[in-house]
Structures are given as C-alpha cells and as structure tokens.
Image (cartoon, helix red, strand yellow):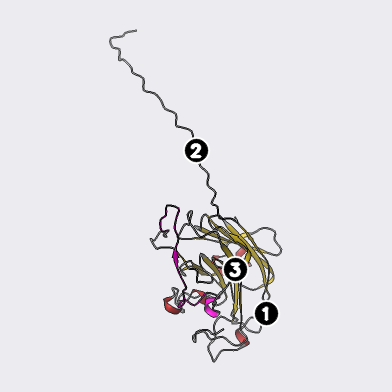
Amino acid sequence: MAFPTDILLPDNARYYTFIETKKNFNSNYDITWSFSYYFPFSSFQATPNYQLGFTTFITSLSYPISALPGQYLGDQDPEFILSANALYTEVPEVLKTEADSTILLESGILSGSLIKIAFDSTGFYALTGRDDRPGVGLETDCHRDALVIRDFDHNVIANAPLKDIAVDSVSTTFSTLSTDTWRTLRFRYINLGQKLHIDVRESETTTYSLLTTINLDFSLGSVANLDNIFVGFSLCTPISASTSLSGYALSAGNFYLRNFQIEGYEGATVQTETVTTPLLSVVSNVATTTVTNVTA
C-alpha cells in the first residue's frame, strides 16, 4: 500500500486493523466491549523510546479501507473522504451537537465514525494532521503514554497522560502501557452516545476499576442508519520515524491480544414505551359564608 510522503515508517513496521463483523449493534442502545492485552517489559527493554499505539473504535463500516499507520493509528487519510451524511431524528430533523454542529456519519472513514479511543506511547494521535485535521501542538500538549480520544468529527475530546487520569488503585498499575501480566480494558458507550466509561482490571483481580469517564458533547436520539454499528481494533509500531531515525530501534516487540468481547442490542427496531402517571389529586373549591356577631 502506498502512503503519503509525509508518513515515514521503516520497512519492518507493524500495523494492522480488524473489525468484528459477526455482530452488528444498534447504537441507540448501550454498547459494552472489552479485551485483554499483554505487553511485557521484554518487548521494549532494548528501546526505551519505543513507539506503540493501539486503539479501539465504533464504526459504521464492516471492513477496513485505506487505513493509514503512524500518527493516524488506522484512520483514513483526512484528504480522502468518500461521503458524509447528516444524521436525522424521527421528526425528521438534522441531529446536531450542543455546539450546534451537524453530526455527520462519514461512511468513507475507517474508524471514528462515532468514537475512537487510543492508548499511545507517543501521544502523537492527538497532533494536528493532514488537511487541517484538528489536534494539539507537539511541544505543548503531546504526552508520553497518553489516552487520546477523537469523536465523529475527528476532534480531540480527551488527551492526557495515563498517570494523570488514573485514580485510586488504578494509578499505581496503569501509568504506562506496558504490563507483565494480562490487563483487561472495558469500554461502556452509554446514554445514546452521551458518555463513555473506561474500566481496567489487572489479572490478579476479579473486579474492574474505573479509569475515567468522558462526557461527550452530543446525544444520539432515535436516529436512522445507526443499527449497523461495529467495533474494531488497530495497532501500529512505530508511530513516527524520520529517515535518519528509521529502523527497528523504535518498534516495540511482541504485543498480545485476546478475548475481544462485545455486548449490545442487535436489531433495527428502537423499542419505546409510553409511561403514564396518575392524575394529580385536586382539592375542590367549597363556597363559604362569613358569619359575624357570634359570641360564646
């Protein structure tokens, strides 16, 4: 595959993407998915500045097309958008964000149609990119071992180092991407796209701990064309390398993935229920007569 000239990766770089197509989900309902990964210290001990990023995403496409490695971690080239269609409610009305921006379902984009979550050792996924792709600056807002989230319009809605967002028991175990035991990540996309919970569970525990909650700036109502939603995964190593730095030195070693599981509602019908409440009680008005000149 030929990539733009500004994407420079060594010949032995590794990048891949898959989409789980056995089940398609309706995003009018909650979607929960999880997977376990194992990225041992031995995979990068010889390269302290290793570059590796992995992502998970919700997409309207059932197969990957024209994906870019490197900084884009599997996104399609921003210069090449096949089509973009507005989402409509049942009324119908064009669905917009709270900031009054039209929500577009870009059927030509591999991932990020609804949301894409990246765990990036370099933080480069948050950078401004090709064709005015929104993002942050390299010197000021790019973080090592970062969690980066982009929405349906590619906007960066979360960008922080893991050590800063981890809380309670999570903070001591998930400050870097590496783990010498299997680690499980769970994602809960809920409330019609209004909120995303990310949970983590280490191998020695049986319960999840909340890593972070992201409040998204849009709400999906009863909309059309959202009953064929798929969940996917992508990985790239290294993320970026100039010609002088290219080579295997920045590429991480073995990365293991297992137990990719998804739960949600399968079907096109949006179930509705009419909720009725009893009438409020009414105190009737009773006419009264004022009596005067009464003594005890």
- Kind of residue at disc 3: Gly
Tell me where residue 171 sits by quadrant.
Answer: bottom right
Q: Which residue is mark 3?
A: 232
Residue stretch in magenta: 70-94
- Kind of residue at disc 1: Ser
How far apart are labels 3 and 1 at the CA level? 24 Å
Tell me where residue 268 sits by quadrant.
Answer: bottom right
Mark 1 nearby-residue class (10 Å; few <14, some 14–19, many ≥20)? some
- Kind of residue at disc 2: Thr
Q: Which element is circle 2 on?
A: loop
Q: Is residue 285 above or below residue 243?
A: above
Q: Which element is circle 3 on?
A: strand
Q: Nearer the viewer, residue 78 or 141?
A: 78
Mark 2 nearby-residue class (10 Å; few <14, some 14–19, many ≥20)? few
Does 219 appear in magenta?
A: no
Res 43 label: 1
CB-based contact (under 8 Å), mark 2 and mark 3: no
Residue 136 vs residue 54: left or right? Answer: left
